[in-house]
Amino acid sequence: MDVIIIYERKLRELENAILLKINLEKKGLKCDVRQFYEVNRLLKASKSRPKVIASPHLYITKSIPRIFSRFGEANFIINLQYEQVLSEKWEKLGHHNPKDEAKKAFHICWGGKTRDRLVESGVAKDNIIVLGALHLDLLRKEFREKYFAAKNVFAEKYNISSDKKWTLFISSFTYADITDERLKMNESAANTSLSSFVSIHTDSRDKILKWFEGVLKKDLKNIIIYRPHPDELALEKVIELEKKYENFVIIKNESVKNWISSCDKIYSWYSTSVVEAHFLEKAYSILRPYELPSDFDSVLLKNASFIKSYDEFEEDYFNSENNTKFPIDDSFVNQYYSFNHLNPSFDLYTDFIKNLCNSEEKQEFSINRIMRLKAKLTTLSVWIVYSLYKMSNIDLNKYRSQRKNNYLINWFIEMDNQIATDKEKNEIENRLRKVLNR
């Protein structure tokens, strides 16, 4: 195996991984796409030595032996960095900056702002490569017509009338009504208090739901589609609204860019996925019922114009004019997302990875024996849980709506949510090959 591409969050990363795999294989490289928890493949992979491993993130030293214990000791690790546009608070905390031995890997940046942040954190300039964002490639004009599912495809699949106007809300209320257990887990990972996030997320969500109900009372025909963030677990209040109004639906599936393309209006609160609407040249709006603390707000979105009151929202919702004025200026978007007009990013990524595969060099990481042993034990524990998950006949659907489950059930649900079946991967690959057949 030349290249292994790891994905962690299926909806966010799998399509990008398969897109890159297709292009690498066109260049004659052997490539595989794997999820972090697929231990039946991991133990086999640990005996091999891929030339390059592309990881969705790489923050600290212990991430390196964890990757090696599961996928084999590669010559090079590439950090795809799926979280690059952060808040001021997260930038100051430095949680997303590579530290210690992780700095020695290659770190791909979407734009100049992230490159500058990593340089300031002490990552060598030679280890930072600005190649643009993979998830924006299929928004390019040469791919759009073939890539996007027609609105009537989703209408049939999710039983929504294609004759009605569709409004999309891209949610990111991951801390709304969060359990104490999960909050402590996130605080432990970030090594800081995140308790202030809870009220910000909860209050903003509750107010926006009231805004939705306000227009739903007046518009009984058209559809509002609520797309929750993959880590948004407390959906009870959203489900209440869905039960109350037939034209309010919660849909977690499909890529956000496909929903953006299919919908007539796009709203967000905090999600940087609005950038995909920006690159599609499709009007979108950002709802801010409460002013966010400056250090909490996204470094990109804080420069935007907002809808701040229900009256503004109602006026915008019922406005049938095609508004082409975007709330974020191009100059701010371009700082975080570079765009090559001649080549899509997956071509640039492929050229870079192919050069590494042909290189005689190798990255050297200083990992002590204790850390290597701990990584192997962690891999063993994942293998045990994964094996139990595969053997289990439990109906997980009856547990998904519960916020408190036992340890194993929580892991089973997480694995079920994030690990794609071979059928899913084949469907995505077949669809993308047709799109890329230029």
Image: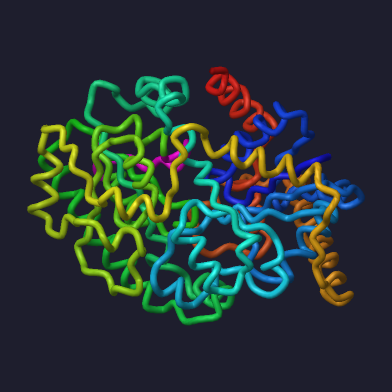
Image location of residue 73, percent across then percent down: 85, 56
Which secondary structure type mostly characterizes the magenta part of the structure? Answer: loop
Quarter of the image that includes the N terminus: top right
Residue 248 painted magenta: yes
Quarter of the image that includes the C terminus: top right
At 65% from the left edge and 60% from the top edge, which residue is drawn? 127
Please state the extent of the stretch shown in magenta in the rendering.
Answer: 244-256
- The image quadrant that residue 339 belongs to is top left
At 36% from the left edge and 20% from the top edge, which residue is drawn? 152
At 29% from the left edge and 24% from the top edge, which residue is drawn? 161
Is residue 233 visible to the viewer in this orientation of the structure?
A: no
At 35% from the left edge and 24% from the top edge, which residue is drawn? 151
Is residue 65 visible to the viewer in this orientation of the structure?
A: yes
Image location of residue 130, percent across then percent down: 54, 52
Say left or right for 39 vs 269: right
Residue 68 painted magenta: no
Query: Would you place residue 108 above or below residue 279 in this image?
Result: below
